[in-house]
Amino acid sequence: LGWYASRQLLFEDKIWNGRLIGQVDHENLNADPDDKVVIKLNTASNTDYYLMFNRKAGVNAGTIEGGNQVMIVSQPGEGNSPGQSVLLSKMNAGGVYTIPNFDNSGVELTVTVN
């Protein structure tokens, strides 16, 4: 992905259980080594999806939209080329977002925030 190398996950499995942390915490020594800053939901198509926790602290303290929420965006071009990302969801604990027909598989991919 190119950013936060030690805290990223390229998701290609069926289930992931873990903790997202804000980008402001990517070097936090108290964070668990398995905590992630960004998760890329990889697809074979031109559009991929990214999950991140928009922690409202540090350099991000003044954020207005989606503060302290899990955000899901779609982005064309494998994240390697310029392209307009689209904010799909801002979720608090208990939030659920479903991507229908994920990667043209005929299966829904559901993201749940605990």
Image (spheres, helix red, strand yellow):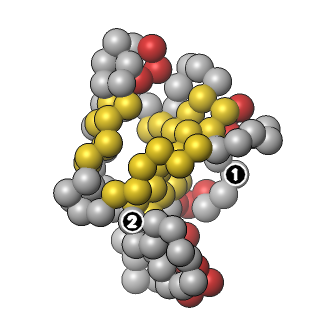
Q: Quick check: 114 above or below 72?
A: below
Q: Callout 1: few (<14), some (14-19), or many (20+) C-alpha neighbours within 10 Å?
A: few
**Count of numbered circles in the view:** 2
Q: Residue at x 31, y 25 (%)?
A: 108
Instruction: Describe residue 86's horizontal placement relative to residue 95 as left or right.
Output: right
- Residue 85 in the image: x percent, y percent? 64, 44
Nearer the observer, disc 1 or disc 2?
A: 2
Q: Quick check: 106 above or below 96?
A: above
Q: What secondary structure is found at the residue carrying circle 1? A: loop
Q: Residue at x 46, y 66 (%)?
A: 66
Under mark 1, the amino acid is Gly
- For marks 1 and 2, the one nearer the N-term is 1
Residue 22 can be seen in this image: no
- Residue 12 in the image: x percent, y percent? 43, 31
Q: Residue at x 36, y 24 (%)?
A: 100
State which quarter of the image contains the C terminus. bottom left
Res. 57 mark = none
Q: Quick check: 109 above or below 45?
A: below
- Residue 39 in the image: x percent, y percent? 48, 49
Check the image and name the residue furthest to the right.
82
Q: Which residue, given by chain and number where applicable, does mark 2 sit on?
A: 69
Residue 12 can be seen in this image: yes
Q: Callout 2: few (<14), some (14-19), or many (20+) C-alpha neighbours within 10 Å?
A: many
Q: What secondary structure is found at the residue carrying circle 2? A: loop
**Distance (Cα) linking label 1 and label 2:** 23 Å
Q: Which residue, given by chain and number where applicable, does mark 1 sit on?
A: 2
Under mark 2, the amino acid is Gln
Q: Residue at x 56, y 34 (%)?
A: 48
